[in-house]
Amino acid sequence: MKRMNSQKGQALILIAFAAVGLFAFTALAIDGSRAFSDKRHAQNTADTSVMAAALAEIRTPGNATAKFTAGRNAALARAVSNGYNNNGALNVVVANTNAVIVELCSNTNVTHAACEGMPAGADSSEYIRVRIVSYLPTTFARIIGRQTITNAAEAIAHVSGSSSTSSGGGSGYGITTLGTNCSNGGLFFTGSGPRTINGSIGDNACFDASGNGDFTITGNIDISSFFNFSGAGDWTVGGYVWVNGFDKSGHGSFDVAGSFFSNDIFKVRSGDFSAGSLSVVGAANHTFGTTVTPWPAALGSSEAPGTISDPFASSLNPPPDPGGCVARSFGGSTDATIDPGCYTSITRSGAGNLTLNPGIYFLKGNFNVGGSGTFTANGVMIYMQSGALSTGGNVDLNVSPMTSGTYKGLSVYVDRTNSSPITLTGSGNSTFVGTVYAPSSNYTANGAGSSFVIDSQIISLRAEFTGSGGLTLNFNPANNFGGAPPNAPSIELTK
């Protein structure tokens, strides 16, 4: 009888090979998803850490070494708060140990690739990089011989300028509000017209955006208190946003090109939100149906925005009292021209044109321009020792500051002891150039029915931008008091 070969045990071999394959697919699903999640978290952490480093650099006085040390410490603290503990080495990655590497892109003693994303001819010493290398112990992938998975993420920020007093330096903002509480200070964007701010914003108190028009801000936003966004318009911010709490209930979109950091709660209850990176210290949540990108928010380290001080407190003094003050009033359709000097009041109504010859106008009372016609004041500085300043009606404004001398670039100077309000209402044919300095006053700009363009820097206790017409503020330092600020900071996330 012929003996047959036994096939017993072959199924076990096939099952063993299949089990290895199943474990490999399981490892891909479980360990792969863990690696993807860690990669995303590491990238968010790198983004927020490099922005923390950049902000620390511009806030730290001293030489380049002191600035970089402060930036590196801030980045490491932010990374630790997000679960990435540095191994203590600046440029050396120790095997199987998480590493947070913070360096200037000008550093030649690096062990990995050079910084990417810098434009041709850029100064590499102005670019700072945070690189996070993490090692994840595997679970099922050990079956196929993979003990760890290595992730690497990096972010690069361009930092230029510095300030030892605040995150932006008062003279570096297009709009600065100095009031330190929400009852006497703050910044308010109301009305229905579109708003464009070509510059940055610094606010020591609340920021309330309830207007329904679209908003475009090309620079940065620094808010020392709460940012309440309840309007219906869409917002676009070209720089970073630094706030002490954020609540978005308006259904318009909110898009930030740079980082968004909230030192308190973060809420999105309506509409969509996006930012280059998102870091929150307090509770962060968004309502079902809204989109927040990136999400989840990275956990930030507590760091309240710095208080902005009066940038001209020690450098700007009132003009001498010329004496011989008079009151002038004009109405009807007759044109009038007046000369520099001291006035107890200036009032203009009716349809006639009013022209101010170049020079300094010293006011000890109200300056009111209403009616229609044209108000022309070129080469002029209006000093309000007391009294309110207002333009209204359908007046075409044509205002520009002196181009030389002590008050070059300063169009309106309200004495620090004068808390009377400043109200500018302009038609679509209006132009207003020069700094409005009113550190103890409430400032209101009203675009009434048309587009009002202000080529100015606003420094006030409180500010409101309102009206149904469009309103544009262009901050060109060369056209304003003090010229181009040498230390106006800039931060840009380049990678």
Image: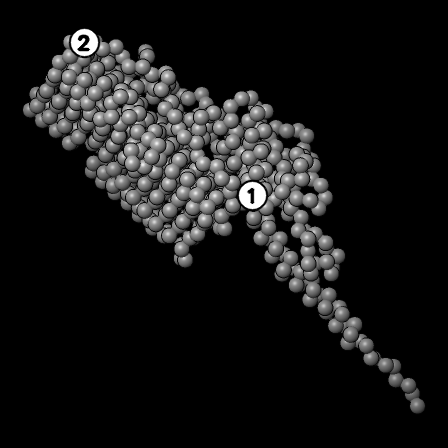
Task: Give the secondary structure at mark 2.
Answer: loop
Label placed on residue 68: none
Given the image, on which type of amino acid does mark 2 rest? Gly
Q: Residue at x 59, y 46 (%)?
A: 83
Q: Residue lying at the far bottom in this picture: please name it.
A: 1
Task: Give the secondary structure at mark 1.
Answer: helix
- Near-viewer residue (450 or 387): 387
Location of residue 21 with respect to 210 vertically, above or below: below
Q: Residue at x 36, y 52 (%)?
A: 270
Work out how far the residue at label 2 is from the one at label 1, CA to CA, in angstroms: 62 Å
- Residue 189, by quadrant, is top left
Q: Position of residue 84 (x, y in %)?
A: 61, 44
Q: Is residue 11 left or right of residue 391?
A: right
Q: Residue at x 27, y 40 (%)?
A: 190
Q: Is residue 12 left or right of residue 445?
A: right
Report whether residue 193 is seen: no
Image quarter of the N terminus: bottom right
- Residue 12, by quadrant, is bottom right
Q: Is residue 460 left or right of residue 166?
A: left
> Crowding near pointer 1: few (<14 within 10 Å), some, many (20+)?
some
Residue tagged 1 = 81
Residue tagged 2 = 323
Q: Is residue 406 left or right of residue 372?
A: right
Q: Position of residue 198 (x, y in %)?
A: 36, 32
Q: Position of residue 343 (x, y in %)?
A: 16, 15
- Of callouts 2 and 1, the N-terminal one: 1
Asked whether disc 2 touches disc 1, contact meaning CB atoms under 8 Å apart, the reply is: no
Q: Residue at x 23, y 20 (%)?
A: 384
Report whether residue 228 is seen: yes
Given the image, on which type of amino acid does mark 1 rest? Ser
Q: Position of residue 16 (x, y in %)?
A: 76, 70
Location of residue 154 with respect to 352 vertically, above or below: below
